[in-house]
Amino acid sequence: MKEIEKEKTGTLYIVATPIGNLEDITLRAIKVLKEVDLIAAEDTRHTLKLLNHLEISKPLISYHRHNEDIKTDILIKELKQGKQIALVSDAGTPGICDPGEEVIKKCIEEEIPIVPIPGACAMINALICSGLDTKEFVFIGFLPLNKKNRKEKLEEIKNTTKTIILYEAPHKLETTLKDLKDIIGDRKIVLARELTKIHEEYIRDNIDVLIERAKELKGEIVLMIEGAEKKEENNLLDLSLEEHYVFYKEKGLSKKEIIKQIAKDRNVNKNEIYQKFIDRN
Ligand code: SAM
């Protein structure tokens, strides 16, 4: 069966492409690129190189940050006329720090089907080999350049207990590391550089060493920061009331002190807590 069934309205396929190594493209992505009527690309010249490598010849239309509005309208019109369209960015997954959001939102509004074609994404591949906590993480993308917004974002980063993932251009790495040091202080940092390429490497070091080395680090970089240590109070709120009681009991607090402390931690009236433990010694 063909990957693409002809329907009245076309489908927009969001196709991930390699982030370096050209072999990192899925069989399904190749099939979709071969079968669509049109490929919308962030940079048509860049995508042409990939298509030539895959021996695919298709009409290309540019779809980048600065023409997203106009090109969204054109793509929607084509989709409504039954054209099957693939959207690709220069590298990795479209929509992740790359154009895509506008046309996807518009497709949802217009009830045009959208299908993701999974593949490479720098942040996921950086994270999985980082050695940092992968259970919970926050993807920030590029830090804002505006001073005030940047400071606010860095303050947010300082307080999050989850692994933080940033994208950064090599020539801005030193400044970003210095800003991180100023606001969050010394924290475990992992740099994933040139993923899937010849000079791929992970650099795990403290912030001062990384600042020293920043100038010599060329190529594409994902910067990951270990989350802030969880405060005891945060953990306590995850406990059941009974566990919360035992926690303070084991610390040697009296019943009265425990009730007072639980009420404070949970920001509730202490009588409420007292009622729950009325029979407790
Ligand atoms: N859409 C892409 C994705 O799925 O990851 C991201 C595009 S964003 C414009 C480019 C940024 O992604 C780079 O500045 C870098 O931070 C990161 N990046 C892309 N390719 C990379 C690679 N091979 N190694 C490390 N980081 C990479």
Image: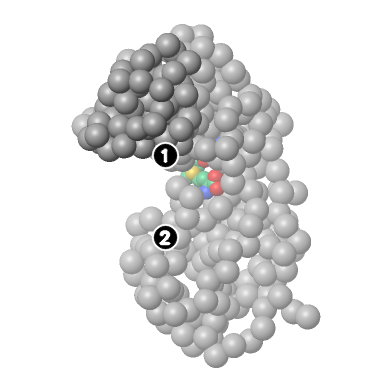
For the residue pair 36 and 102, the one nearer the viewer reads as: 102
Labelled pair 2, 1 in contact (Cβ < 8 Å): no
Q: Where does residue 65 sit, x and y in percent of width and height?
A: 38, 55
Residue at numbered disc 2 = 101
For the residue pair 74 and 122, the one nearer the viewer reads as: 122
Q: Which circle marks residue 140 in the picture? A: 1
Q: Where does residue 261 sit, x and y in percent of width and height?
A: 31, 23
Q: Which circle marks residue 81 in the picture? A: none
Residue 92 is left or right of residue 161, and the answer is right
Image position of 138 with respect to 79: above or below: above
Q: Report the image quarter containing ligand 1.
A: top right
Q: Earlier in the sequence, mark 2 or mark 1?
A: 2
Q: Residue furthest bottom?
A: 8
Crowd rating for badge 1 (residues with CA inside 10 Å; few <14, some 14–19, many 20+): some
Q: Residue at x 72, y 68 (%)?
A: 31
Crowd rating for badge 2 (residues with CA inside 10 Å; few <14, some 14–19, many 20+): some
Mark 2 residue type: Glu
